[in-house]
Amino acid sequence: MSTEMTARAATGPTEPTGPTGPTEPTEPTGLTGPAGPAGTAETGGSGDLGPGEAVRSMSSGAVVDAGAPAGSWLGRRDPADFPAGLVAEAQATADAAAEAVGVCFVEYRSIAEMNEAAGLLDRVWRPGGGGSPLVTAALLKVLAHCGSYVVGAHRQDRVVGVCLGLLADFGLHSHITGIEDGWRGGGLGRALKLHQRAWCLRRGIGAVTWTYDPLVSRNAYFNLAKLGAVAVQYHPDYYGEMADERNVGIPSDRLLVRWDLAGPHTRAVLSGDFTPATDDAVVALGVGPDGGPVIAGADRVRGAGRLLTAVPRDVEELRVRDPALAARWRPALREVLGGLLADGARITGFTRDGWYVVERPEQSEQMRQTPRTQHIAPGHNQEDHS
């Protein structure tokens, strides 16, 4: 089944410990964007942080090195410059993923299609503000007219997913993805992203960025461990105050990720040939007996080249069950993970049981100079449940 129908077819003194038991991350209900849990939130995700918290600044200069050729427009290049056969391979992979899920993808053009897309996004995110839509049909129409990525996933005559990506100077910024109830966790999110990758490569676009809530474990696993995107910067309260039902009252901290569509890391992850190295790692942020965050002492993490930072098993469920406990996680992750990134460390992966793997520059340099087989710590499950 073709995946693109362009012809209009359609805290405390305790020792930090890790999460209790492996998580079972399902496919993101919201993949990227200001969104959070219910769709492929390319708009972000949800967040928690107490107002007035004293936080170190993490506003460094250039966020993303797009790597676009000199003189290129929107980071585009000749698709022939990509590795031989990559574009065809990406399209075939996207087609197979769509067929496995039982959908086709439609590039939207008409205002009727835009209304349908806007309606789905509202059903997923449930925006407040007196009935104001999350994204208007008129804006979607303009973006599509300008060549941006406005695509719906269809099962027969029913739209079950929508994704919006904006053309940018480095390539494409994937802003928001929404997936209908009943379709999450079955592979549609992955199929959408693979379609987006093939769409970009055919147009000479080599990079896609998006944001997500770093506390949402399933989104972290999906973005980093299943797609091969790389987190490049932590943004405190990126979207400011958000009014949709899933994010209202929660600081909108986000991780910005960059997906190098033709890069060796992405290709290795998509083929299942990569797992993050966790040997000799030191826990910088763990989980206490009450399920709350425990920040390791400076003496424990000083000099460690590889660190682990935990997130809750299911922060969205925790926000409903125990909002006060959930609220403690935002400032803790901001301090630890955000602080490490601000100091030049990089996230090299996310494990199945809920840990960010972070490496300081000297460790990363040593890894580049000393090739070795990568390991995953005992108990880490690489099984793909999407």
Image: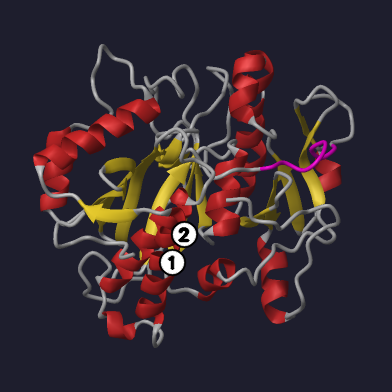
> Which residue is located at x 24 percent, y 70 percent?
203
* Nearer to me, 361 or 313: 313
Look at mark 2 in the image and give the residue it sits on: 100
Amino acid type shown at disc 2: Ala
Query: Do we see residue 64 in this rendering?
Result: no
Residue 14 lies, with reference to residue 306, above or below; the image says: above
> Which residue is located at x 14 percent, y 56 percent?
8
Look at mark 1 in the image and give the residue it sits on: 96
Q: What stretch is highlighted in magenta?
A: 17-24
**Lateral position of residue 53 relative to residue 12, left or right:** left
Q: Where does the image place residue 174, in percent across and percent down from the top left?
A: 35, 50
What secondary structure predominates along the stretch shown in magenta?
loop
Residue sitting at the far front: 156
* Nearer to me, 166 or 300: 166
Amino acid type shown at disc 1: Ala
> Which residue is located at x 44 percent, y 70 percent?
93
Residue 261 lies, with reference to residue 112, above or below; the image says: below
Q: Is residue 22 magenta?
A: yes
Q: Where does the image place residue 249, in percent across and percent down from the top left?
A: 47, 16
**Lateral position of residue 203 relative to residue 209, left or right:** left
Q: What element carries label 1?
A: helix
Q: Where does the image place residue 110, in percent across and percent down from the top left?
A: 10, 45
| Label 2: how many Cα within 10 Å (few below 14, some 14–19, many 20+) | some
> Which residue is located at x 21 percent, y 54 percent?
10
Residue 291 lies, with reference to residue 206, above or below; the image says: above
The quadrant where residue 158 appears: top left
* Nearer to me, 77 or 148: 148
Mark 2 and mark 1 residues within 8 Å of each other at the beta carbon: yes
